[in-house]
Amino acid sequence: MQMTERGRAMWRTCLASAFRTALACTIVGAATLYGPEWILRYVAFPAFSYVTIILIITDATLGDTLRGCWLALYATCQSVAPAIITLRLIGPARLTAGTTALAAALAAFVVVLPNGSTHLVAKRIALGQIVLIYVIGYINGAETHPVMHPLRVAASTALGVIACVLALLVPLPRLATCEVKQSCKEIGQNVTTRVKLYMKAFCAEDAMTAMASVSQARELSRISSKLYQTIKRYQPSMKWERLPFKIWRWQNVNDNKGEKLQSMEIALRGMDMVLSSKSPIPASLLEGEVKDGLKNIQERVILSIKRVNNIPQPSVTPETDLQKPDECLQTLQEVPETSQDLPFYFFLFCLRLLETISTAKPEETKVKPEENKGSVKTKNKSWFSDWDSKKVMPAMKLSLSLGLAIFLGSLYSKPNGYWAGLPVAISFAAAREATFKVANVKAQGTVIGTVYGVMGCFVFQRFLTVRFLSLLPWFIFSSFLSKSRMYGQAGGISAAIGAVLILGRKNFGQPRDFAIDRINETFIGLACSIMVELILQPTRAANVAKLELSRCFHALYGCASLFGAKPSKAEIMESQKKLRSHLNLLKKFTEEAQAEPSFWFTPFNASCYEKLFKSLSKLADLLQFSGYAIGFLEEQGRWKSPQCEEILSDIDKDLKSLTQSISLLAKSFEEITLLKSLNALEKALIKNGNTSWDIELGKTPNPSFSSTESEPGKILNTYLQNCRGVADGIFRADEEGEEIKVDRSEVVLSLSALGFCVEKMGKETREIEEMVKEVVQSENPSSHVNLHEISCKIRSLYK
C-alpha cells in the first residue's frame, strides 16, 4: 500500500521527535549512571530529570526548548525557595502524612492560582518539584537536609533542561521559524490546488467528475486545517529564536501570512457550498467563451495567492495581469431572473472575493489599536468580577487532589507515596477536560509503558546500554499515541514516562515490584482527581455543551442584528469573531460530551449537536458573505452619488427584514435551549399565575417560525424583483453622472451573491429549527414539543 505525503510527514515528525527525546534521555542516563561522583551527589532524582524532558521536548522546537529553560527556572523559584523556608520552619523530622499532604496542597494552590499569567509547563514542573520535595522529605525524615534536599531537586530539573537543549541542537536545530514557513508554503500550495479542483468541478460536464474533485478538495481542506493548527502551535515559539538567530535577519519571522491565508478559507468554503448544493449549474451559463474566461480568472487568483507566500514568479503576462479586467465578468450585465442561476454567480463572486483578499494590504485586514481599547478595558474589569470562578476553582481542585493523593499514597506505601502525587502534578490542565476519558488514557498509558519497561529489563537485564537503545522504538510508538484521537497527548506522555522510569534507572529494586507499586499509586492519584472533580465541579460535559449552544445563538443574534444598523467594520469583525469562537467551543464540548459516560443521565444527542454546529457555521459564513457583498456595493454606489444611496437603501431594507427574522429566531432558540426541562417551565408558569401565554401580550416581537416550505422561496422572489430595479437604478445613475463610473459586473455579482445568501439563510434557519426541536424532544421524551408554544410561554414570564 502506497503511503501518502501526509503519512510520510507524520512518520518524519514522529521519528525526529523520538530521536531527540531518546537522545536527551541518553544524556541524562549517561550522566547519572556513568558520570562522576559529584553529579550523582547533586542529581539525586534522575527520574524527575526524565519527567522534565518529556514535559519540555515532546514535539518541541528550539524556541520551545529555550522557553522551557526559562519556565523551568521560573518554576524552580516558585517551588524550591518557599519549600526551603517551610522545611526549615517545620523540620523534616516532624513531617507526617497529614502535614506533608497539607504543605504540598498549600504550595500547589499558590502555584496554580495565577491561572492565566503562568505557562502550563512551568506549573507542571513546579508541582512535580513540590511533590518530590515534601514527600521525599517525609520519607527520609530527619536525614533530609532542609536546604540541600530542595536544591538537589532543582539540580535534577536543570539536568533535564540542559539535556533538552543539547538534543535540540543535534544534528541541526529544529526551528519554529522553519516550521511556520514550511506550513505557510504547504497551505499556499493546498489553496491553489483546491482552487483548481473547485474550478474543475464547476466546469465538469458530468456529476461524477464534479463530485470526485469536490471530495479531493475536502480532503485537502482537512489537511489545511491541521497546517493552520501547526502555525498556531509554533508561532509563540518564534520570538524565542529571534535573539540567537538575529544575525540571519530572516524577514519572514515577522510576517503574518498564516492569518492572511486563513482569511481566504471563507471564499473556498463558499465555492464548496455551491458545489455541494444539489441544484446543478445551468449548461447555458457555461457555453461559449465563458470557460476560457474562467481559466483566466483561475490563473489570476492562483498568481495572487502565490504572491502572498513571496514565491518568485515570471514577469506578468497580459493574460495574467492583475489590473486587467476579466472579459468573462464584464459580460454579466443583468441580475439573474431565477434562483437556479444564483449558484453560478455566487461561485464567481467567491473567486473575486478570493482575489480581493489575497491582494489586500496587511493594514486592511487588521483592526486598529484604537478600536480595541474598549475590549481591553472590559478585560481589566472582568478580571476582578470572575476571579472566584476562573482563578480559585482550578487551584482548589488541584490542591485538594494533590493533597489527597499524597496522603492516601503515603498511607498505602510510604516509600512510594510520591508516585501517587506525581501523575496528578505533571498532568495538570488549566482548561476543562473530559474527566473520565483523560483518567482512562492516563491509566492505560502508564500501564503499557510500565509493562514495556519491565519486559525490557527482563530481556536486557545484563546490558544497561541496550536498555537505553530499547527506548527509541517506544518513544516512536508514544509519539504516534500522542497524535492519535484515542490516547492524545495525555496518554502518550504517560506511556513514555512509564517506560523511561524503569529502563533509564538502576538500583530501584526489582522491576516487577516497582511496576506493581507504581501502577497502584498511579491509580490512587487518578481516583483522587476524579473524586475531587465530581465533588467540586460535577457539571457534565453535556450540560456545558448545551450552555455553549445557547451562547452560540446569543452570538448569532448579535451578529445578525448588526445588519441594517450601519455598524463599523471593527464591530462587524468583532461580532463574527465572537460567533466563531463560540462555535469552536461548541465543537470542543460536543466531543467531550461524546467521550463522557452517560451513567443514569439522559444520553447525549451528539449527532444532533454536530448537525447544529454545521448549520450554524454555514449561517455564520453566509452572514459574512452578505457583509462582503454589501461592502462591494457601497464601493460601487453609495460613495459615488446620492441617487445610488437612495437606491441601495431598498436592498438594505430587504436584507434587514431577513436578518431581523434570523436574530429573533436566534434569541428565541437561546431562551429555549437554556430551559432545564419543559416541566420546570410549566411549574414556573403556575408559580407566577400565568394561565395565558398569548404572544401578543409580550413586549418583544414574535419570532417568525417558518411554517411552510415555500416561505424562503417567496422571500427570494421578492428580493430578485427588487434587485433588478436596484441594478437598473444604479446603471441609470451611472449613465446620467458625468464623473461616476460603476462596474456593472461587480454590482450584478454582489446582488446575486446576496440573493444566494438570502436563499441559503432561509434553508439553514429551517434546518436549525428542526435540530433545536429534536434536541428539546430528546431532553423531554414524554412531552410534545412545539417551539412556537414554548417561546410564547417563556416570553409570557417576562411580560
Image (cartoon, rainbow, N blue to C red):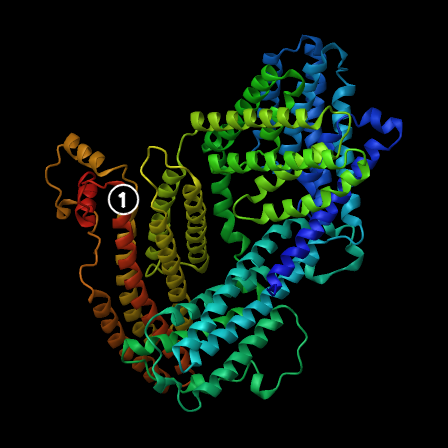
**Residue type, label 1:** Ser
Residue 234 at x, y percent in the picture: 64, 52
Q: Nearer the viewer, residue 280 or 759?
A: 280
Taking the image as drawn, is residue 240 in sight? no
Residue 92 at x, y percent in the picture: 70, 12
Name the residue at the left extreme: 691
Left or right of 539? Residue 105 is right
Name the residue at the bottom extreme: 288
Q: Which residue matches tag 1?
A: 778
Identified at 45% across, 86% down, the residue is 291
Taking the image as drawn, is residue 796 in sight? yes
Residue 27 at x, y percent in the picture: 80, 39
Left or right of 732? Residue 710 is left
Which quadrant of the figure has residue 597?
A: top left
Q: Nearer the viewer, residue 179 or 552?
A: 179
Residue 586 at x, y percent in the picture: 41, 47
What is the count of numbered marks? 1
Identified at 52% across, 69% down, the residue is 357
Image quadrant holding the N terminus, namely bottom right
Q: Is label 1 in a helix, a strand or a loop?
A: helix
Left or right of 55? Residue 780 is left
Identified at 61% across, 20% down, the residue is 104
Identified at 21% across, 55% down, the residue is 705
Q: Please determine whether, in this image, residue 337 is positioned above or below residue 218.
A: below
Q: Please determine whether, in this image, residue 332 is positioned above or below residue 343.
A: below
Name the residue at the front extreme: 459
Query: Neighbour class for label 1 at 10 Å: few (<14), some, many (≥20)?
Result: some
Image quadrant holding the C terminus, namely top left
